[in-house]
Image (tube, grey):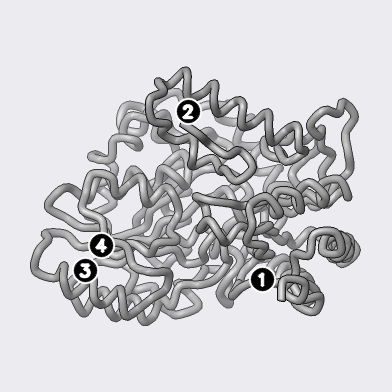
């Protein structure tokens, strides 16, 4: 074993040859201490304030909070702090208490679960949905339940880790990100070889912020007798004329076979869902182990129902979000930074080198700008970046602070395209 810490990523410590679990964890701790000593461990930073555009952080090695502009939150519409949503949660807790007490099949299915199932299904112009305690589980548990060794999952290589985990029990074929030619090639080869064929894509991709060409993917998928699964976790509330995501953008409500998503981003809560035909949803409710054997969500999910209403009732939040997205994105492009093909509230500032990306994260945090350095395996080894998540609750002054911060980092590290050329 010879891991070069300066060039390493978390992936290098997943399965260290010759080391048992405790020895491997000790080796990983050495790596984390290396990052900490170099000021590059800006993960699991403690916040002493609510989720919002400004957060007060306890930085590594410090005891007093530091005020920082926050660009790490998926609370795109600021709904985790919306007074009406908070009020709905408080009212539900006062009525039902703080927990549900059981799994859904044996006493843990309450009125608030039933209401939310119908609400999220109707949001996508359907009738039936199933709830999971996390968005991650909505993907992993559903795919594990539906796909077996006789089946195949055909997945975009940039899909979320939850999809990858969900496909562990079945045959998997990947295609290059948004590459329709390669997708068709895989579909042709799989057409007569497998029982159930599912193409699984994200609507909005969490690292690049770009969109799937969903109309073309849907046509190809159904042409070759496969089903289309779309995880639009980062699209709901953000993309589409009424915030119904990439599915609405392409008007594919009738052509997506299985819709998955999360309540933990634009809707400001926690949990996941799957929307599909009634018979498939019923099957999942009695066969999906993580749903069947997990205690159900708390009464606080009543806040989600209010949040879904507010997507239609208060569209100004989505309007403000897009004003902020365009302001920050254009400001970064004007300064020569590479933001890729983002078309959402996720804006990557691509750096490439892992060490330089981590140092950029350190300098930004020191300047009061809280961002996420993203590296392998979340992205390819030479495609490390600083990821920025924009919220409706940011002001232009907040975003100017970010832009000035990136200018200063660029002067020190040369991370813009013009500096790298």
The quarter of the picture where residue 266 lies is bottom right
Instruction: Name the disc covering residue 100, or none.
Output: 2
Which numbered disc, 2 or 3, marks the residue closer to the eye? Answer: 3
User: Which tag, 3 or 4, sits closer to the chain's start?
Assistant: 4
Q: Tell me the CA gap for discs 3 and 1.
A: 33 Å
Contact (Cβ within 8 Å) of mark 2 with mark 3: no
Q: Position of residue 366 (x, y in %)?
A: 86, 45
Q: Tell me the CA gap for discs 1 and 4.
A: 31 Å
Query: Mark 3 — residue?
Result: 226
Total numbered labels placed on residues in the image: 4
Q: Crowding near pointer 2: few (<14 within 10 Å), some, many (20+)?
A: some
Q: Is residue 272 above or below residue 106?
A: below
Q: Position of residue 100 (x, y in %)?
A: 47, 28
Query: Mark 4 — residue?
Result: 198
Residue located at (68% from left, 72% from top): 338
Task: Name the secondary structure under disc 3.
Answer: loop
Q: Is residue 191 visible?
A: yes
Q: Tell me the CA gap for discs 2 and 3.
A: 38 Å
Contact (Cβ within 8 Å) of mark 2 with mark 1: no
Q: Crowding near pointer 4: few (<14 within 10 Å), some, many (20+)?
A: many
User: Which tag, 3 or 1, sits closer to the chain's start?
Assistant: 3
């Amino acid at each position: 074993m010879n891991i070069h810490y300066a060039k390493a990523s978390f992936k290098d410590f997943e399965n260290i040859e010759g080391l048992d679990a405790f020895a491997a964890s000790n080796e990983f701790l050495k790596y984390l201490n290396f990052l900490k000593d170099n000021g590059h461990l800006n993960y699991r930073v403690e916040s002493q304030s609510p989720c919002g555009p400004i957060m007060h952080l306890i930085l590594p090695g410090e005891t007093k909070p530091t005020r920082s502009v926050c660009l790490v939150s998926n609370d795109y519409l600021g709904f985790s702090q919306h007074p009406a949503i908070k009020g709905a949660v408080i009212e539900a807790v006062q009525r039902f208490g703080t927990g549900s007490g059981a799994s859904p099949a044996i006493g843990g299915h309450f009125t608030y679960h039933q209401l939310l199932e119908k609400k999220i299904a109707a949001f996508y112009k359907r009738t039936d949905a199933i709830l999971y305690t996390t968005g991650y589980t909505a993907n992993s548990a559903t795919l594990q339940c539906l796909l077996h060794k006789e089946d195949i999952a055909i997945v975009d290589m940039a899909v979320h880790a939850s999809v990858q985990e969900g496909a562990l029990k079945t045959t998997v074929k990947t295609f290059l990100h948004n590459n329709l030619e390669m997708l068709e090639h895989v579909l042709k080869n799989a057409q007569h070889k497998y029982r159930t064929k599912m193409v699984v894509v994200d609507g909005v991709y969490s690292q690049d912020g770009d969109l799937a060409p969903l109309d073309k993917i849907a046509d190809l998928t159904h042409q070759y007798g496969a089903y289309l699964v779309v995880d639009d976790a980062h699209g709901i509330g953000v993309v589409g004329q009424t915030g119904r995501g990439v599915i609405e953008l392409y008007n594919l409500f009738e052509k997506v076979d299985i819709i998955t998503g999360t309540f933990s981003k634009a809707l400001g809560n926690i949990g996941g869902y799957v929307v599909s035909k009634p018979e498939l949803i019923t099957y999942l409710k009695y066969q999906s182990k993580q749903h069947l054997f997990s205690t159900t969500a708390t009464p606080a999910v009543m806040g989600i129902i209010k949040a879904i209403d507010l997507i239609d009732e208060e569209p100004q939040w989505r309007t403000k979000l897009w004003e902020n997205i365009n302001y920050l994105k254009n400001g970064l492009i004007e300064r020569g930074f590479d933001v890729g093909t983002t078309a959402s509230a996720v804006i990557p500032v691509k750096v490439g080198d892992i060490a330089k990306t981590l140092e950029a994260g350190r300098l930004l945090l020191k300047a009061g700008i809280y961002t996420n350095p993203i590296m392998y395996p979340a992205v390819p080894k030479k495609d490390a970046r600083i990821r920025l998540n924009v919220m409706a609750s940011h002001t232009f002054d907040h975003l100017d602070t970010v832009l000035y911060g990136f200018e200063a980092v660029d002067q020190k590290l040369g991370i813009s395209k013009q500096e790298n050329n």
